Amino acid sequence: MLTSVATEWLWLMAVIALVIHCSAMARWVPVQKFWMVYPFIWVLCGTGAAALGVRRGFALAEMLVMCSFALIGLTIGMFPTRKLFVRWAHESNTGATRERWDYPRSHLAFCVVSVIVMLLAAMLLTR
């Protein structure tokens, strides 16, 4: 279904997903070094994933849809932890260090499930 759409629209969808995710993370982790580097890391990872997928025989359209849905799933999955991210960022800005970052297992499980559900939805929409 989505693979029948022109590739330009899928690129636009991937860029919009990247902007939404990076904007949310910039708001949740108010550390300038983080939000200046984070989008470039995702651009490199997304480009690498698309190139690897095409090399393995998947269509570029399928890879763009999968990357877009994965980013949105990751954004949804990290939503419950946003307050912890803000608190940890403020602690980091004040110079406090931690030996352990206690990430709640329920938040991690929710994040994993939301990414998997979004990837399954992407697979269904590309067939």
Image (spheres, rainbow, N blue to C red):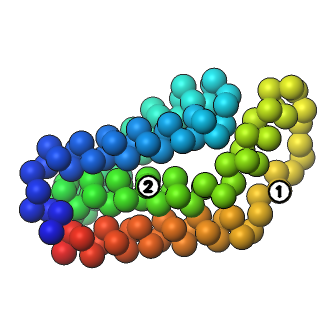
What x and y, as percent, mark residue 31?
Answer: 67, 28
Q: Secondary structure at mark 2?
A: helix
Q: Quadrant of the C terminus?
A: bottom left
Residue at x-position 72% and y-position 70%: 106
Few, some or many residues within 10 Å of mark 2 (<14, 14–19, 20+): many
Answer with left or right where residue 99 lies relative to residue 82: right
Few, some or many residues within 10 Å of mark 1 (<14, 14–19, 20+): few
Residue at the disc numbered 2:
72
Q: Secondary structure at mark 1?
A: loop
C-alpha gap between disc 2 and disc 1: 24 Å
What x and y, as percent, mark residue 5?
Answer: 11, 57
Quarter of the image for residue 60 reads: bottom left
Marking on residue 102: 1
In the image, 56 versus 12, the foreground residue is 12
What x and y, as percent, mark residue 125?
Answer: 24, 70
Q: Amino acid at mark 1?
A: Asp
